[in-house]
Image (cartoon, coloured by chain):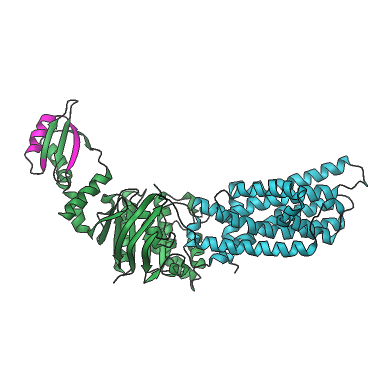
């Protein structure tokens, strides 16, 4: 299933791209924000769950995953180099799974790990930091499966992903309870909240719901993406 | 022996018909797919390579449809027209990565052989981003050949090559064809394929307009009528000299100075114009073929084939 050659090509392409530094920006912002809040708030006030839960899970994690997840395969499809990969007998599901896995691991490095660092920087948050870290690890996997699917289905994957993150997750899911059922941020929060319950996290889903839905969404996205890639067509006549 | 078989294949995009009811069979040796831009050549190649489904008709390689059939890539190599490769890799890394994707038992030997065949050994350790157009073309061929495929499809392989690189590529294709491989390439420039032998399929506006031996088409090409604009140190003397030649159909002194020469034999005129001016002590200042659309050239070929 996992193809090491595809993985190493993907890592080199992703980190070598000029916009590589982009996905480090949300992480830097989170850490700077944490330091700023820590400096301005008296010890003893509790703000970590809000900063880390809100910014970390509704901005840092989804945006990092969005850039990485839509880029690992989408960038190659856009510039046409994907054809060199697709003109080989490597199974399409293997390509999709490997690409999503690489994006997930990079998201963990650029979002989950900074989330852990920020969590440890905030006062009295040892256990909360770990809970958020675990939630972010799981979220990295789900987000990237979905964003890889988006990049195979549409050439406007980033726009679609942004709409999902900003409108559905940040707006609807916070005001309309039912929308949380389809919110990856809420699966991640649900898991974090189960490890370290904190009402400031505003977790709307329980552990089992989060896990089951997360699994279903991940596998569903990977299967759909593989199918879509099997029918990859070069359209249009180049002039 | 037929390897690639198209029967009544059509492909349309919305209302636009790119390929219209094409039937052809392609066997071992070199086959050129010629036609002006937009004639549907790339569409045909993409369909054969399994990257596009025919809207109608059947397309098979060894009697198996290629659409959604990844197994086909074990015996088929594709050199796409677009220049996008993993430019951050060196030439050798790119070919080797392709060998790995094919899970070849001996990737070292396969990589070496492919680089050697395409004459890319000297540049193999340079990043592809530093390559010239011709070298990029060759490294793509090397990657497409690494698994020793029976079929090699090349989309406009001579695009952007200088004459030396073009000759080298033609030699390589001829050699591969002589080894019994099926080599199918597309080109929109007739003159590009002069040195090749084999069969050609001429496409115009999505239809298969003519097919046949390279030599027959080449003969038609070199004897096609053509109009040139000529400027020289003595236009009237040159006109007199040209009128005496059998291939000159008409000579006209144009108002702005200079000559317009209509010739019935493109090849002979081109071969002799330099000698004629020199022998008559005339200096040739300008020799311009008048703009003629590719369509008209192909159109001429088709009409002469039919007659």
Query: Where does the C terminus of chain B fall, quadrant-wise?
Result: bottom left
Q: Residue shown at 74%/44% (left/top)?
A: A29
> Residue A139 in the image: x percent, y percent?
72, 58
> Residue A202 in the image: x percent, y percent?
82, 52
Query: Where does the N terminus of chain B fall, quadrant-wise?
Result: bottom left
Query: For this rendering, which residue is in front, B131 or A236?
Result: A236
Q: Is residue B191 left or right of residue B63?
A: left
Give above or below for B161 relative to A206: above
Q: Residue shown at 59%/66% (left/top)?
A: A4
Q: Is residue B164 left or right of residue B261?
A: right
Residue B234 is one of the magenta-drawn residues: yes
Query: For this rendering, which residue is in front, B109 or B101?
Result: B101
> Which residue range is magenta in the image?
B224-248
Q: Is residue B161 left or right of residue A19?
A: left
Q: Colour of chain A?
A: cyan
Q: Which chain is green?
A: B
Residue at the extreme left:
B244
Residue at the extreme bottom:
B105
> Residue A27 in the image: x percent, y percent?
73, 48
Query: For this rendering, which residue is in front, B128 or A162?
Result: A162
């Amino acid at each position: 299933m996992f193809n090491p050659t595809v993985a190493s090509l993907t890592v080199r392409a992703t980190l070598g791209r000029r916009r590589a530094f982009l996905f480090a920006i949300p992480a830097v912002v989170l850490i700077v924000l944490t330091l700023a809040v820590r400096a301005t708030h008296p010890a003893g006030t509790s703000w970590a769950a809000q900063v880390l839960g809100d910014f970390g899970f509704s901005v840092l994690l989804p945006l990092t995953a969005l850039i990485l997840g839509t880029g690992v395969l989408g960038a190659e499809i856009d510039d046409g180099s994907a054809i060199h990969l697709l003109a080989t007998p490597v199974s399409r599901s293997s390509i999709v799974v490997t690409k999503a896995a690489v994006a997930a691991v990079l998201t963990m490095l650029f979002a989950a790990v900074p989330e852990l660092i920020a969590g440890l920087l905030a006062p009295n948050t040892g256990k909360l930091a770990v809970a958020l870290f675990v939630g972010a690890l799981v979220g990295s996997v789900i987000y990237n499966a979905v964003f890889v699917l988006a990049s195979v289905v549409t050439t406007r994957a980033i726009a679609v992903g942004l709409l999902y993150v900003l409108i559905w997750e940040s707006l609807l899911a916070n005001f309309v309870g039912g929308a949380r059922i389809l919110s990856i941020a809420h699966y991640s929060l649900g898991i974090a909240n189960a490890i370290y319950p904190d009402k400031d996290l505003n977790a709307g889903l329980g552990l089992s719901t989060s896990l089951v839905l997360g699994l279903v969404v991940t596998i569903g996205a990977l299967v759909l993406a593989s199918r879509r890639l099997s029918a990859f067509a070069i359209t249009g006549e180049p002039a | 022996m037929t390897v690639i078989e198209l029967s009544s294949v059509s492909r349309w995009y919305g209302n636009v018909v790119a390929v219209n009811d094409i039937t052809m069979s392609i066997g071992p040796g070199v086959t050129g797919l010629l036609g002006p831009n937009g004639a549907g050549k790339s569409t045909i190649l993409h369909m054969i390579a399994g990257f596009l489904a025919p809207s109608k008709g059947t397309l098979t390689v060894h009697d198996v449809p290629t659409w959604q059939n990844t197994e086909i890539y074990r015996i088929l190599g594709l050199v796409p027209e677009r220049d996008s490769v993993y430019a951050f890799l060196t030439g050798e890394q790119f070919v080797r990565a392709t060998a790995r994707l094919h899970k070849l038992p001996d990737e070292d030997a396969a990589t070496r052989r492919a680089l050697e065949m395409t004459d890319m050994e000297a540049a193999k350790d340079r990043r592809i981003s530093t390559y010239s157009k011709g070298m990029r073309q060759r490294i793509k061929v090397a990657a497409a050949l690494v698994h020793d495929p029976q079929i090699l499809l090349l989309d406009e392989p001579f695009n952007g090559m200088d004459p030396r690189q073009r000759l080298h590529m033609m030699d390589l294709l001829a050699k591969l064809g002589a080894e019994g491989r099926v080599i199918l390439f597309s080109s929109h420039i007739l003159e590009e394929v002069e040195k090749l032998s084999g069969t050609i399929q001429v496409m115009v506006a999505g239809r298969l307009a003519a097919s046949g031996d390279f030599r027959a088409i080449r003969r038609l090409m070199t004897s096609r009528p053509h109009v040139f604009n000529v400027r020289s140190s003595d236009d009237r003397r040159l006109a007199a000299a040209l009128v005496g030649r059998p291939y000159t159909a008409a000579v006209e002194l144009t108002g702005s100075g200079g000559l317009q020469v209509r010739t019935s034999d493109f090849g002979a005129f081109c071969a002799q114009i330099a000698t004629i001016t020199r022998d008559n002590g005339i200096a040739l200042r300008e020799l311009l073929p008048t703009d003629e659309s590719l369509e008209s050239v192909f159109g001429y070929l088709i009409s002469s084939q039919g007659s």
